[in-house]
Amino acid sequence: MKKSLLILLLVTLFAGAFAQSHKTQNVIIVTLDGMRWQDVFRGADSALINSKYTDDKDEVKKQFWAQTSAERRKLLFPFLWSVVSTQGQIYGNRDLGSKDEVANPYRFSYPGYNEIFTGFPDVRMNTNDPITNPNMNVLEFINKQKGYEGKVIAFSSWERFPQILNVSRSGLPVYSGYADLKNTDANDRLKYLNELQKDVPRYLGDSTRSDFITYEFTKEYMKQYKPRVLYMAFDETDDMAHEGKYKPYLERARQEDGYIKTLWEMVQADPLYKDKTTLLITCDHGRGETPIDTWRSHGADIKGAEQTWFAVIGPDTKGLGEIKTSTTTYHKQLAQTIAQLLGFDFKKNAGHEVGDAIGTVLK
């Protein structure tokens, strides 16, 4: 009993000390839907390059192939493996013993995003249908805190986030699919994007817009409105993988790395954000690896689909680089980690189970 009380006291003192000393005042969260950890840490996969899933193999090798995994992954994710790897932390290289996983048993998108933002791998969330999520999410919680009211926003390519983040209850502005930005004082560029998204080719279907449009909305919104918490959700890596198109999958991944790089450079050039902002990058689920055909898929019946990754960079995160210790982190821990980076306690206020924060992310 005395030992338990001592541990509780130490945890409370640590949390209190961090709340007083933390520097993070803003958070940017980015997800790359269905992006495999194998490609993040090893770079382009020779088995997939030389398979039926890759057209124009010579061109893919020219763009993405090198002799070592360190070289290949930097060709695929230049920003991640030049800036985040030196100034931040990257989790999930299972080749080195660092395991990152989803805790939910379903291993597909809605359950994955529910877990990230509510900290709760709710077994009821076994659908991609437009059901309203009953669980409070960390963005909703932060939006209610002093100084953050009306300063939290989400842009996503996939149309399901208004239900995942329960906009009818949370009141969060969530612009998903082909939804227009509703701000009456929006600048001309944002108004133009409302028009442009209606005219771009809908190669992802009538509900999911291109990641380029999602990125452009996010970038221009940041410039004008200076949100304090921003979520940007890309989708095309998952779409290309499901279609069995490895070359476009790699191309979208590198393109999205470039989008993230541009946002981070904007952050570093803006006094309102510079040295006050933490960036977190992750995915919603993994994919299969063997047999090779399972790279297209994920779900409860796909071996390895629970295997994920995340990266973080910011003023309260030590520059440990690639995590090489034998540890396991779970996506149910990310919601409380995000809250604590801003000095808040989501777990205490969520009204449901929430995973503990990842202590190594916090100095």
Image (cartoon, rainbow, N blue to C red):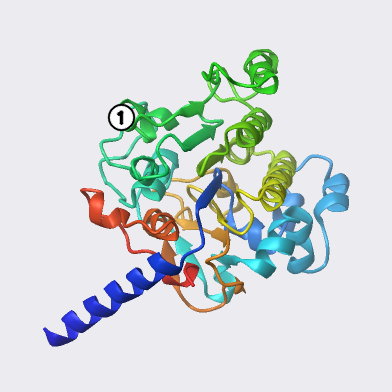
Q: Secondary structure at mark 1?
A: loop
Q: How dense is the environment of label 1, judged by Cα within 10 Å: few (below 14), some, or many (20 and up)?
A: some
**Is 143 or 52 nearer to us in this picture?**
143
Q: Position of residue 205 (x, y in %)?
A: 58, 20
**Is 258 or 316 nearer to us in this picture?**
316
Whether residue 271 can be seen here? yes
Residue 7: quadrant of the picture? bottom left
Q: Is residue 268 above or below residue 155?
A: below
Q: Position of residue 233 (x, y in %)?
A: 55, 39
Residue 328: quadrant of the picture? bottom left
Q: Position of residue 281 (x, y in %)?
A: 56, 52
On screen, residue 187 versus residue 72, left or right, reads left
Can you identify the residue that label 1 sits on? 132
Residue plotted at (42% across, 56% down): 334
Q: Position of residue 254 (x, y in %)?
A: 73, 47
**Is 46 or 43 nearer to us in this picture?**
43
- Image quarter in which the N terminus is found: bottom left
